[in-house]
Image (cartoon, rainbow, N blue to C red):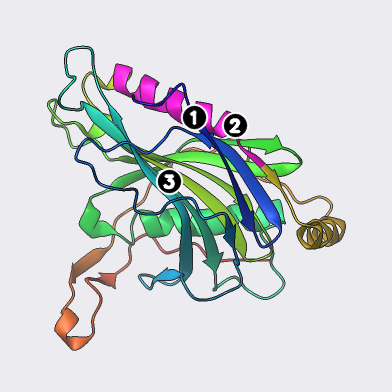
Amino acid sequence: MPGLNTPEQINVNLSGSVLSLKLPPHYSSDGFEARCAPIETMNIYDPSGYSGDPVGTAVFNSKCFISRRWEIFGPLTQLQFDGLISFVAVVERIDSLPEGMSCFNPNHFEQVINRLIFKMGPEQPAFGKKVGPVNWRTEVKNDCLWVCYEMRKADDGDPNSFAPSQFSSYAVTPLDDHHYIRLMFHNLGYKPAEYSNRFVNSVRDKVLNSVTLTLSEHALKRKADVQAHWPDATMSQQRPPYNWIYPEWRDGDTSKGELHTVITRYHTQPPEFYL
């Protein structure tokens, strides 16, 4: 993978909280530029620039601050890549979190992630069935709680399918009551999946091992207030994947103002927030 061993140091100021990480340089053999060059300073409270996804019953809005592509070449494929990783970093805002809840409360933050995972799974049925969360784990770095997990395609029974090597990994951490960082690694791998997955996961781990978040004074004070209010709040250290039953749905009529996907009947209900 070009640039894997010569990463760039990147620092992003997110309304006073600073994210630092090392990333391999963007590489596209077709010559396309990165969709979002690293943004050095972002006001996460400025509503402009956020893109929303109105599907479902919870509203998440995101603002991208890094996007790059990394192509993977084998020893015999110098002219055409075998696979690729699309890395995207966003600040996400959840607008449907009930009053009194905070992402700095580990239990509340797990509920936010649960709702996000449901939106990425049953509430996007047009993209095929997903399995998640896979390989859920938590880690505290620089006194910041990070949650890592994967979303995978459901087994379609096709032995020739590339699905086992095509999946996404995520790392998320709170910035304040309603905002959090989500780092995304979208993998389009190759066969055999065992070797492909081992490599893309090594790239992910190398990036995540370089990550440091230093919260702003305002965020640290708010975090301390939340922890004082809920001193015993915890988050699951391990999680099995959900056993979803996907909803009934149809293609929407966008000329009539409908969404591209219209869910007509839920079987597995969306998770609800609770204090």
Disc 3 secondary structure class: loop
Sequence-wise first label, 1 or 2: 1
Q: Which residue is mark 1?
A: 7
Give SS at disc 2: loop
Give whichever of 271, 144 is nearer the camera.
Answer: 144
What is the residue that sits farthest to the top in this orientation?
A: 75
Measure the C-alpha gap from mark 1 to mark 2: 10 Å
Q: Is residue 77 visible?
A: yes
Q: Position of residue 132 (x, y in %)?
A: 41, 43
Q: Is residue 62 left or right of residue 250?
A: right
Depth order, front residue of 85/60: 85
Please indicate whether residue 11 sits to the left or right of residue 52 in the image: right
Q: Can residue 188 be seen by looking at this rendering?
A: no
Between residues 159 and 201, which one lies in front from this camera angle?
201
Residue at image mark 3: 242
Q: Do tag 1 and tag 2 residues touch (Cβ < 8 Å)?
A: yes
The amino acid type of the residue labelled 1 equals Pro
- Counting from the top left corner in percent of width and height, residue 212 is at 66, 39
**What range of the chain is rendered magenta?**
195-212
Q: Which label lies toward us, 1 or 2?
A: 1
Looking at the image, tell me whether mark 3 or mark 1 is earlier in sequence order.
Answer: 1
- Dots 2, 3 in contact, CB < 8 A: no
Residue depicted at 35% across the width and 70% down the height: 55
Residue 174 lies within the magenta run: no
Q: Amino acid at mark 3?
A: Tyr
Give the quadrant of residue 266: bottom left
What residue would you read off at disc 2? 210
Q: Position of residue 174 (x, y in %)?
A: 64, 54
Q: Is residue 211 magenta?
A: yes
In the rendered view, would you say 271 is above or below 150?
below
**Within the image, what quadrant is residue 125 found in?**
bottom left
